[in-house]
Image (tube, helix red, strand yellow):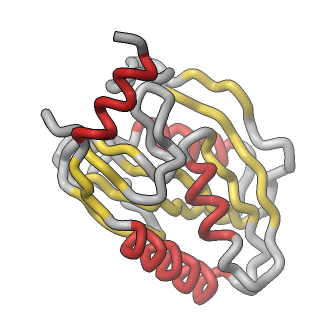
Amino acid sequence: MSQVSEIRQVMAEADLVVSEETINAAYDKMAAEITDKLADKDPIFVCVMNGGLVTTSEVTKRLQFPSQIDYCHATRYRDETVGGETLEWRATPQRSLEGRVVVVVDDILDEGVTLASIIESCKVQGAAEIYSAVLVNKLHDRKVDKALVGDFVGLEVEDRFIFGCGMDYKGYLRNLPAIYALKDH
């Protein structure tokens, strides 16, 4: 079976976990919470590529105050369905984070390895305040740091392998406007 055929089969058999309507309401909620807390703080949003691209776009286009956007690319998954042992840094923010209010934006808080490492990197770069914004917090007890919680969280989902809204299945399906789960998980 070709990879594209596999992807089509996965999509055809997937369970809808969160509808597009619910996702849009989550983005609205996150934007309102961010506005309430940070509208007067000149924040810089650091998009975690590639997964955070959709969440960053959807949340920031709902904000009606001045802000900047940058990105970083750190990954453990490398188009696989489970994360590797080490974090691979592919790009760091180009703008200075020194003295800035930083909002790290990603698609999901799963085990928290990537998010914790990026937050630590922002601290090292001199960020004055660091917040995290994630569309999804996955409910389980495998978080590397039990104290790591998203500051701005769109929604919570059960512990299944999910994709859509920035989250991928083997590098595909990030573009889906709703969240799906593999049938077998």
Identify the image quadrant of residue 149.
Answer: bottom left
Residue 9 vertical placement versus 183 (above, below): above
Q: Quadrant of the C terminus?
A: top left
Residue nearer the viewer, 118 or 30: 30
Residue nearer the viewer, 149 or 52: 52
Residue nearer the viewer, 177 or 36: 177
Q: Is residue 4 left or right of residue 51?
A: left
Q: Is residue 156 left or right of residue 129?
A: left
Identify the image quadrant of residue 81.
Answer: top left
Q: Residue at x 61, y 66 (%)?
A: 58
Q: Residue at x 63, y 62 (%)?
A: 103
Residue placed furthest toward the bottom: 36
Residue placed furthest toward the left: 184
Identify the image quadrant of residue 65.
Answer: bottom right
Q: Residue at x 43, y 74 (%)?
A: 26
Q: Residue at x 28, y 44 (%)?
A: 143
Residue 128 locus on image (x, y percent) = 70, 63
- The count of marks equals 0
Residue 171 locus on image (x, y percent) = 50, 28
Residue 9 vertical placement versus 97 (above, below): above
Q: Is residue 87 left or right of residue 63?
A: left
Residue 36 vertical placement versus 150 (above, below): below
Residue nearer the viewer, 160 or 146: 160
Residue placed furthest toward the top: 1
Residue 162 locus on image (x, y percent) = 31, 44
Q: Quadrant of the N terminus?
A: top left
